[in-house]
Image: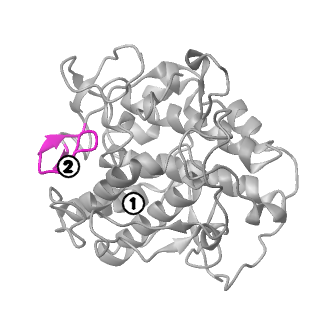
Amino acid sequence: MQLKSLLFSSFVALGVSVAAAPAHGPTCTQPLIRKEWRSLSIPERHAFIGAVQCMQRLPSRDHTASGVRTRFEDFISVHQLQAPFIHFVGHFHAWHRYMIHTFEDALRNECHYPGALPYWDWSLDAAHPSTFYSSPVFDPITGFGGDGSKDNTSVVTADTPIPEGDGGGCIQTGPFRNLQVNVGPLNSTTYNPHCVRRSFDTVQAVGLTPAVVKTALQSKTFAELMVHCEGDFNNPDPTKGVIGYHGRGHWSVGGLRGTMSDVSSSPSDPLFYLHHANVDRIWTLWQKYDHKRYTEVAGTSTPFTHPFTPDPSGTPVTLKFPINLNGDKPAHALNVPVTVGDLMNTKAGPLCYDYLG
């Protein structure tokens, strides 16, 4: 991923009882249950893939940017336009929670998908490079297809020295083979048809271990969890920064030239949503250990300030901090504006879902 040099570089049972989520406003009584991809039945996997393909066929509804042509691209462009302001900030978790929830709603309401957004627990695939390559999420029939074709000439999407991978070109197999999108790469929202690219990076993949998730879940504060998720750049030497599991998950699929490594247009690859559902799941699990965590926030609205770096500047993010999914015009929004406080509990306010596993 890129963004001020986006830097270089599961959940396992902890044997600790978790507190029930407290109510902050109306709670839902029948939450959707998000499941890990490999726990879905084959028909359920096909149903999800079919719903994503439906989104890729539907015309844009919100016209979130000039190059957008499809409903799927409405979501890409909103992420592109806000990318400089939603990473390495205090509202990163809340903003992405709302985005993937809104995508899930669109799948269900506009493409008649009956299930919940699945997640990809990449820690199950981190034992060895071969384990990663053989992950069910990359299955060409019941998954999202595998690596991209070999292409060392495509645009570099990661602005850090990640080694050249075996891919770099269009997705070669599966239901998203040669998938085309019309915005991107990078932050360009003008009309530019091109394929979604992948370049698997197993160095990043094998770093997404169950131990990494366990350590994150043992965080004493939300600020500590934020650093485990996005990265620690408090060392005065910027080359000593440590990327978190969020970035590693992107880079494991995107590598040097792939779409998932593109901090702006990574939602062009459908795996973005499964990866971010897992990031959200880890936050949800962490919250459940202590009811006080449903109101705990940290960080500022300025990227790369405390707790990611020693920089103390920036406006602190509070529960009243506004979250919006607007496009390039205020009227072009995917959903109504909310606050961080509205998004702290997955079973309250505008949200109604939970995780299995």
The residue that appears at 31% across and 31% down in the rendered structure is 258
Q: Is residue 209 left or right of residue 158?
A: right
Q: Is residue 177 left or right of residue 192?
A: right
The residue range painted magenta reads 179-196
Residue beneath disc 1: 43
* Pick the front one: 237 or 327: 237
In x, y percent, where is residue 114?
42, 73
* Pick the front one: 110 or 80: 80
Give above or below for 58 relative to 12.
Answer: below
In x, y percent, where is residue 196?
24, 39
Q: Give amino acid for label 2.
A: Val
Q: Give amino acid for label 1.
A: Pro
Residue beneath disc 2: 183
In primary-sequence order, the first of circles 1 and 2 is: 1
Q: Is residue 256 left or right of residue 209?
A: left
Whether residue 37 appears in this view of the structure is no
